[in-house]
Amino acid sequence: MALLHLLKGAESISSLRDRNAAAAMATTAIVHLFQPLTFWWLRSETASDSLLMVSRTGPNGVWLSNADKVGGTERLARDDLYQRHPRAREAIESHRTLHVPLANGNYSVLLPFFNPADKLDSLLVAECREPLNPEQQDGIFCFLHFYANYLALLDYGELDTLTGLHNRKTFDEALERLLACQPEFVGPGEKRSVDASHPFWLAVLDLDYFKRINDTWGHLFGDETLLRFSRMLKETFRHEDRLFRFGGEEFIVLVRAQDRDHAQQSFERFRRRLAATEFPQVGTVTCSVGFTQLDPARPAIDTLGCADQALYFAKANGRNQTCNYEALIAEGRIEVHAPVEGGSGLGFDIDDYFA
Ligand SMILES: Nc1nc2c(ncn2[C@@H]2O[C@H](COP(=O)(O)OP(=O)(O)OP(=O)(O)O)[C@@H](O)[C@H]2O)c(=O)[nH]1
């Protein structure tokens, strides 16, 4: 019966494109298989040594990390994990499931799962009344394997092949979700508190004189520059921030910040770091940034248009700077952005729009 439940979970997940819904479904299927008293599901991520807490039991039920919400994810540094579960290191290093007897008669189960390249994919940490039997362990391994393949397929359609950032196709969906900003939760009821008091900010970042890099050094160095730029984005912004390659040498960053100054500081931190970095062969690379506040009352297409208007101003006034749309309006330096008639989606080319 338990295996049938797993199969049903896999069937449901395979029809989904929403990662949060899939993670919720996967959590339910795994938990149903071995009925733990407490449960953590950690997944490793390529860009970080920390582990993403996909889901865990909390005081009010199961909590699900909400990867699509700014501020909705939880990560655990490996050192913290090893401090809280000293045998986790042994389980990972030996590639073995450990059942550690506890003083209360239960077992602490540490189940690592590795991908075909022998890299840690997931670690389950659970307290159970009984050790897992071989059938349960095999069921979990098969399911985690299926889930990893499913995520890889999603990535293939949603990630930019050069930089690994989210591609433009996923951007409008993410923006619509942030504008709607409905917290999503699973399980019997625990709510993760999302700090709704901090607004979202959308920045468009565009490399300066990128054509010159291609023309001088060739497209391979151009591509390498885009790759390094993207890596720096990932390193500089927080895990919760959302990064997209919008197209060509244009990128979008969505952050949550308490006010305009804090948002400006986060974009400026990146811009300054970029300008201070020597790229191999190419030398100094700079970017211009235009940003605006996300306003649920403003259609997504206009939000993007406002940020791009600020970017356009930054480009026309010296480049290598960060400009805020609302500040430029208040200072009378640009006109109020004219809303796009009938435009609710984002199916337009940002460069054509401002040509
Ligand atoms: N190597 C490489 N070049 C790209 C890619 N996508 C777009 N480009 C190039 O990026 C360049 C963008 O040039 P422009 O739009 O003129 O902008 P710019 O030279 O950065 O000038 P400003 O934005 O005004 O500072 C074009 O030469 C494109 O061919 C890519 O994936 N790889």
Image (cartoon, rainbow, N blue to C red):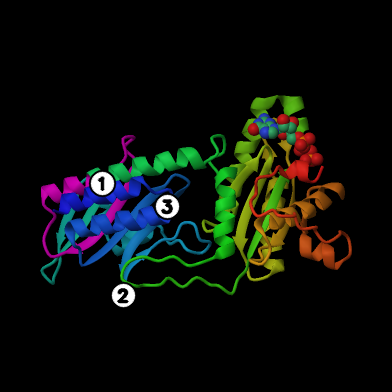
**Mark 3 crowdedness (10 Å alpha carbons): few <14, some 14-19, many ≥20:** some
Dot placed on the residue nearer the N-terminal end, 2 or 3: 3
Q: Which mark is residue 114?
A: none
Q: In this rendering, is residue 192 above or below 80?
A: below
Res 19 label = 3
* Residue range of the region highlighted in magenta in the rendering: 112-141
What number is the disc on residue 59?
2
Name the amino acid, label 1: Phe
Q: Is residue 242 magenta?
A: no
What residue lies at 76% left-to-right and 26% top-to-bottom?
215
SS assignment at label 1: helix
Q: Quadrant of ligand 1?
A: top right
Q: Is residue 236 above or below residue 198?
A: above
The residue type indicated by label 2 comes to Pro
Amino acid type at circle 3 is: Arg
Query: Do we see residue 78 in this rendering?
Result: no
Q: Which is closer to the viewer, label 1 or label 2?
A: 1
**Residue at the front extreme?**
342
Q: Residue at x 80, y 65 (%)?
A: 327
The answer to whether mark 1 is within 8 Å of ligand 1 is no
Res. 143 mark: 1
State the CA–CA distance, disc 1 to disc 2.
26 Å
CA separation in Å, label 1 and label 3? 16 Å
Please identify the quadrant where the C terminus is shown.
top right
Residue 133 covered by magenta stretch: yes
- Residue 233 on image: x %, y %: 61, 48
For disc 2, the neighbor class at 10 Å (few under 14, some 14 to 19, many from 20) is few
**From mark 2 to mark 3, how far is it between C-alphas?**
24 Å
Q: Residue furthest right?
A: 332
Give whichever of 222, 275 is nearer the camera. Answer: 222
Q: Position of residue 307 (x, y in %)?
A: 73, 55
Residue 202 is situated, as x and y percent measured from the top left of the image, at 66, 57
